[in-house]
Image (cartoon, rainbow, N blue to C red):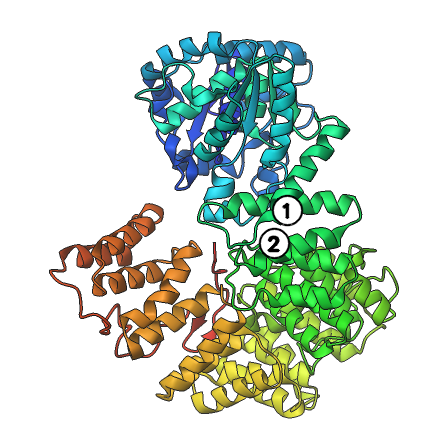
Amino acid sequence: MTRGTGRLIAFRNDRLGARIICLLNAMRLAHSLDLPWAMQWHETHDIGRSFNDPLTLFDAGLVARHFIDREALLAVQKTALRLGGMAQEAGIGPPPAEGLDAAALRAHLAEGGNALIDMPFGLIVLRGEAPEDVATEVARLWAELPVAPALKPHLAAIAEAVAGGTAYHLRRGDLTGETRAMNRAWPAKYVPDAFYEVHVERTLRQGRVPILFSDSPSVLARFAARYPGLLDAETLGRPDGLSEGQRDFAQLWAMAQAARIIAPAGSAFSSAAALLGGAPKRSVTEDLAPAEAQRAQRRLARRLRAGNRPPRPGEEGDLGQSLHHLARIRRAEGQPAEAADVIEAHLSRGLTLSYLFPLLIALRLEARDWPGAERAGSLMEGRTLYHRLDQGQALMLRALARIGTGDLRGAASCAAQAWWHEPSTHLVRIGLGAMLEARLLGPANFLPVTPAVHQLRPRLAPRLPKDPLFVPLTQGMRMPAAPRLPRPEHLGWDWAALGRSTRLDPPMPPEAEAAALDRLEGQVPPRDLAGLRLLAAIHRDPQEATLAALAALAAQASGDAMLQHRLSVAGWLLRDHDTARRAARAAAEAAPHVPAHAAWMGLMLARTDPAEAAAALEAAIAAGLALPRLYHEASRARLKLKEAEAALALLDSARALSPADTETLYRRAELLLRERGVEAALPDLEAMARLDCYWPKAVALHAECLAAAGRPEAALARLQEGLVRQPQDARLRAAAERVALAAAPAPQGGAVAVDGAAGSDARPDPALADGHPSRPAPRDSTG
């Protein structure tokens, strides 16, 4: 046949099982339909780095003929026809193909199109194909897969040892040992030991051989000591001399030879083994009889209650996942308070996994224990929550708890901080919308919302769910159970620069936005609607003519604070700083008791009048608008006034408010370095490293401080972490050269000059230019 320029491309960026599934799906389609194919083998810096080099797993000829680099994938990824997978959820490419047949796929490739295969589970079956034939062909390709020479004798020795056995897959690894992963709950991938123990005990009673597969040496050792009749998959075949990645591949091969697989429901590794080897796979929790499941649950609960000490290093991940599992069990039984008691005890003893904090507050709310929910929220204070999502959700839940206890001022403060941390999270959006609807948030304690924004509700506007989390609102505030809520996303039109990022993500497509605004005709004041229309237009397409129209409208109503504010926002967006400053002052004068207008004026005046800017920002903070951005800009203004101690005090307050905010940590580290020396700056820089923050400026500053403190090896290791991710960054490369060539570190505790950090004001904020919020700014990441 005549081949086109397109091809099948397999790609996954996670671990081995899902990658093999994509690879074999591409090979199967290529063999069956005589189509060209390629594989992009992703290189990673996390736990999957053990198999970064495909030549350790596959025959060199296969790699040379079919494996492509990252750039080749990126060139076609957005336009490729997706044959399955999860990429649509990440906003990559068109929707997956449905009902595609062989002729259509051939035609697509013949016309130069590409097809992306990127799903973690299952086989691609085209219309007209028999699933059993596809499975048979994939199994044949798996058995004949050209592997690296070092693997061949090892794989040949496995089949006989495994045949007829029951394979148990205990997924641990990164879920319990890597910081990013262990700070998330993985209920579909992690099942506590107790459930496996009960199942293994049944298998041994039946006279069958259990074979244990796990990526955790401690799990293997624990089970081997408890069950002498169990086989450790690590010992199968001839593992000596194999790399870690090769052992992973060999274990996938071994599991595929088993007669039966018991594993977590969401494990791609064991699902791939079952698919490739034809063995039935059962979820360990679903395969237990009711009496066995209850025995496992009692064993789990007993172990979690037994601990009365802080977790030891290496225990946190298993402990957190087990606590989350216990919470799911007790919730299903209608006993959230029992799970909350156990989780609270562990958090009080020092366990800090970010997802457990919102979970604990939610459990207390579900039990209608408002004081307990507030007490749970207080456990966050001073703790560094790894994921910003968890911080935002926990703050919103704490706001609901405070409504329940009657602390409405405290509830508003928590809600404002939740908006700052994670405004697009579903829970935060619903909570903010409900508090706006109940008038618990308003101009005096949050951000002013005009009638047009408050009532701008497209057909898909959220409803307040019938959920026990929101009982404090529906009972205490006498709200209807499921009202339509304002969409807090629209706050960004007026107040984006006070948020964590100045980037405005459009809440609706332009057509839907226009229709929603049209529906407000006759329902809200005409001037409010006209001003909002013009501001929305400027956000989409900044034009001087639109600014002039908004200025003319504002001139007709000098006492309308929000209209003056919108003119200021428009001037800021168009970099007309005179208009932005003048209109911001007019808004603040028209509404002197609204802290948000004072805060905005402070931002707009920062470049020309730092004294007035600092005073305005600090007044807004004192009035209760405690958003970290205000502390940042007030600190910058104080530095311009040569008031370093006042600037540092503001950053201290910002750090107490949001311990995991990387921008606060970086600003504070720079200032501490300048004022108090290396040792004072290092704790904040090390906190950024623990949060997996790899900003080049932060990595370079951290490394040079480590070198100055007499720790050159640690400095070079930190720089290497940054260079692995951004190998061409000039700042990192220059810092690496300086550290490597330094004959002697700076005196202990002495200040060092790093890219102008010493002896100068704080460095420019990436989200601000010359004291003014820039547009747009990238969302910084805490990892």
Q: Is residue 712 left or right of residue 157?
A: left
Quick one: which residue is furthest to the left in this view?
743
Q: Is residue 21 left or right of residue 721?
A: right
Count numbered badges in the picture: 2
Rendered image: mark on residue 356: 2
| Residue 119 visible (yes or no) | no
Rendered image: mark on residue 92: none
Q: Amino acid at mark 1?
A: His
What residue is disc 1 on?
Answer: 324
In the displayed structure, 64 sits above or below 491; it is above
Residue count near mark 1 (Cα–Cα under 10 Å), binned few <14, some 14–19, many ≥20: many
Q: Nearer the viewer, residue 534 or 94?
A: 94
Q: Amino acid at mark 2?
A: Leu
Q: Nearer the viewer, residue 425 or 289?
A: 289
- Residue sitting at 60 percent across and 17 percent down? 204
Query: Residue 714 at what x, y percent from top left?
Result: 26, 54
- Residue sitting at 51 percent across and 48 percent down? 316
Query: Residue 399 at what x, y percent from top left?
Result: 69, 68
Quarter of the image where one finds residue 638: bottom left
Query: Residue 545 at what x, y percent from top left?
Result: 59, 74
**Do the CB atoms of the residues marked 1 and 2 lie less than 8 Å apart?**
yes
Q: Is residue 58 left or right of residue 482?
A: left
Q: Nearer the viewer, residue 311 or 748?
A: 311
